[in-house]
Amino acid sequence: MNETDIDIAVVGAGLCGLALARALHARGQSFMLFEARERLGGRILGEYSASGMALDLGPTWFWPEAEPHMTALVAELGLEAFPQHDSGTVLRMRDPNKDAEVLDQAVHGGAQRLSGGMAGLVQAISGSLPAQAIRLAHELVAVTDVGVHLELRFRCAGRETGSGETGETETVIRARRVVLAVPPRLLAEQVRFTPALDPEVVAAMRATPTWMATQAKALMSYPQAFWREAGHSGNAFVRHEQAVLGEIFDACGGSDPSLGGAALGGFVAMSPEQRTQFKLGMPMLVHSQLSQLFGEAAGQGDLHFHDWANEPHTCAALDRAEPASEPEYGHPALTRSGYGGRLHFGGSESAQHGGGHLEGALDAALRLQRALAPTRAPQPISALNAHCIERFAAWADGQSEPALAAYQRTLHERLSSQAREQLTHYSVLQSLAETYDAALQQLAGLPFDASGSVLEQGWSELTAPVLQPMHGFGPTLLDAVLRFNRSSCAISNFPSEHSPDPAYVDAIQRDMYAAWRTFALAGNTILLQKA
């Protein structure tokens, strides 16, 4: 058993952990990156066809118009992106005994892919990290708070013995700060925390599904994209009980498949149990369905298959028991630190924006980057800026009653229009949006002098003290709203609004947090413009 003391331990070398490690290294901070698998990338997984074409068995796309972090990282790393091929007809099959319907529609909404596959992200980032800071085959089993640092216990794959067997060892690491960039459900099920974590955090971990945990992906590679020649986009939807692949897409490794081969990809419609039952026959089933859709040539390719439900470092028991078709991510409890600020949660499932996507992994990494930034003495606030902050604070102090009145007005408008669903949710967010818009107008009109403010990762040094008067405004408004609802005759006939259950309140709080994040970014932009 070994013991090592380090400053920052990042557990989980998926995109979140890798991006965070890259930022820490660029900032000169000491860290070590631990990964349970014997490879980097987490759910980013690539293989190569016989022709050398990259195939994504994990994440495939990003959307530049909606995902600024991914777009910026791809450009910064100098990686080449190309649009997902969507031109041509789309096939839809609802009956296995009938021909597929032919549709003419776009499917992927401006999605782009990376030349060389998403594994290029992993290679580009890891190549900039010091090799001595990376530990593979380190599976976290316990976290213990022992005072000034946390003790991490890892189960490690041992070296091969003379008999050909591989043993296991345990390693204990002591770190002053720890980031767990691992799916929350896996942490809840596989890691022992001493002392026990806050019950709200544990509940959030167990309630957060792992993205792609129960999914499987199949890719079939070919010498040429014959479906394009036939006028098909490669997109197909199969919606019947015998479906093997539910959604199919063109998986060619570039905009011109003649340069490096071609492929069709698909998400498996069968449950994990069915996939296990038909494991030996899976290649034949995939070939058969693709042939039924695209003709005999579609059954002549090479199959590449990966079942994420069989990965112990991806799929938790709860994921198998409670598969989620439309999971919700970014629970507020997973963005808070524990053990006196020494423990932080990361990963795409903890993101407030883009949860479950690569964008979410980067969003979480940026949050952690800020949380782990080196502390330094704050710069003194000038008399002018202090005066502006006082004026803004005085304005903010008077917004509680107008915000509640705005909520009541919106609520009554929705009742008058015969709206019956999500009354409180919609009305609270509308009131909050009006208040934040008014606050931004106030900030824009105040004569802040931001010329000397120091920027840290795109943030003005003035942002935190300027926005401080608005901290907690949303929760305070929600408390007032819930008190009003309990006493309101107008909504007494709506039990879910009159006395909302915890799940409904939790959903409102998630969207309020997202609104606050948008407001804080907009306020920061105003201050940067004043610089």
Image (cartoon, rainbow, N blue to C red):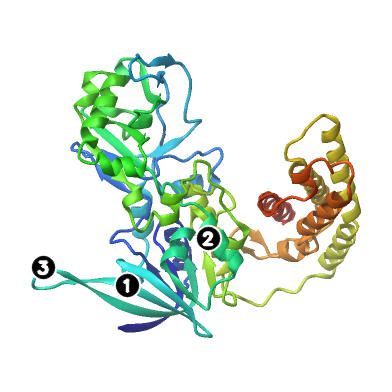
Residue occupied by mark 3: 164
**Quadrant of the snapshot with the N terminus:** bottom left
* Label 3 with label 1: CB-CB less than 8 Å: no
> Which residue is label 2 attached to?
205
**79 shown above or below 39:** above
Q: In the shown orientation, is residue 49 left or right of residue 466? A: left
Mark earlier in primary sequence (2, 3)? 3
State if disc 2 and disc 1 touch (CB < 8 Å): no
Residue type for callout 1: Arg
Classify mark 1: helix, strand or loop.
strand
Q: Which amino acid type is marked by label 2? A: Met
Q: Element at badge 3?
A: loop
Could you say where residue 405 lies in the image, as x and y percent from the top left? 90, 47
Tell me which residue sits at (45%, 55%) in the image: 318
Image height of 175 relative to 165, above or below: below
Residue 208 in the figure: left or right of residue 138: right
| Residue 155 numbered tag | 1
Residue at 49% in and 51% down? 209
